[in-house]
Image (cartoon, grey):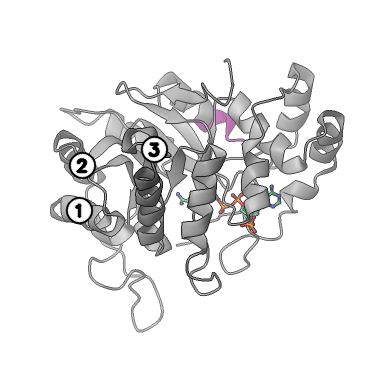
Amino acid sequence: MNLTAESHRVPLSDGNSIPLLGLGTYADPQKTPKGSCLESVKIAIDTGYRHIDGAFVYFNEHEVGQAIREKIAEGKIKREDIFYCGKLWNTCHPPELVRPTLEKTLKILQLDYVDLYIIELPMAFKPGDAIYPKDENGKFIYHETDLCATWEAMEACKDAGLAKSIGVSNFNRRQLEMILNKPGLKYKPVSNQVECHPYFTQPKLLEFCRKHDIVIVGYSPLGTSRDETWVNVSSPPLLKDPVLNAIGKKYNKTAAQVALRFSIQRGVVVIPKSFNPQRIRENFQIFDFSLTEKEMKEIEALNKNVRYVELLM
Ligand code: NAP
């Protein structure tokens, strides 16, 4: 694969394509100053990022939309240059809720379409205003839905032009097979967004997805923010890894850049989150060096098969 800043897109099975590098935008809304997402997306676009990963439940989609619209108004980009991925939350799986939920996201973004709309998680919560519905004992209230019916509603969103492409997130092989084997399937999921980085390399899922033309989008590609409220911090910090740092030294790159390069060199799309201008730029500088086969193997051997994001719900 020829990886340059100009040609860093991978084809999707529906004829569209996805930039190999995107900006992740999840940041704890309680701890993050208002406007930092807006500024970061604008800096990212100026830096050359064209792919932004967001979600309704990140509660900053309005800032993402504003940043994109401001950059379009400035003449820096056109709408079609940007690839925005939005996500269908767990409380919105019933098929009749899918399109209205996407329309709500588009209203927040003030955009006409998203480039990719994905089912954020395979399990459903009780529909309603509570994002995390819980019973009197503090237990999540789940909701029985048919993922295949949810998928058909996603297909209808693509047909209506509200989403250029549709995909999934946090799906395992069995859940992917359920969609792929659905009678009357109109569109395959183009992508599966899952945790993927040198400590959690997902070799089996990667192979399965490759076989079915499903692009893996690797989230937490730098090993997360290590926020103890949702991250398994018993797994050591990825960016302190001696192998990643030693390889970085050789190329005058950081461990973060080596980790990102490793993923894109395997054809895994990466969406590192940073709201820091210097690190946003640093994470973009991964197209001007390449890892040798031996280095790729060394990094692959770091796999611990342990998730940072356990998704205990
Ligand atoms: P990540 O991208 O692996 O790491 C983000 C953390 O690394 C932040 O604390 C960031 O801080 C720091 N950082 C960024 N660049 C750095 C660099 N060059 N050197 C050192 N530290 C650096 O983690 P993530 O946010 O968990 O994952 C990325 C994105 O994936 C999310 O934002 C979200 O869009 C998506 N995601 C999706 C799901 C899902 O279920 N589908 C789950 C998790 C995440 P600063 O901001 O201060 O730079």
Residue at 71% across, 43% down: 256
Q: Earlier in the sequence, mark 3 or mark 1?
A: 3
Tell me how far mark 1 sits from mark 2, CA to CA: 8 Å
Q: Along the line of sight, which residue is nearer the eye, 56 or 276?
A: 276
- The mark found on residue 83 in the picture is 3
Q: Which residue is mark 1?
A: 103
Q: Is residue 251 magenta?
A: no
- Whether label 1 touches label 2, CB < 8 Å: yes
Q: Earlier in the sequence, mark 1 or mark 2?
A: 1
| Label 2: few (<14), some (14–19) or many (≥20) C-alpha neighbours in 10 Å | many
Percent position (x, y) of residue 86? Answer: 35, 48
**Quarter where residue 162 is shown:** top left
Residue 71 located left or right of residue 253: left
- The mark found on residue 162 in the picture is 2
Residue 104 located left or right of residue 18: left
- The mark found on residue 255 in the picture is none
In this picture, which residue range is highlighted in magenta?
Answer: 200-205
Residue at 20% across, 53% down: 103
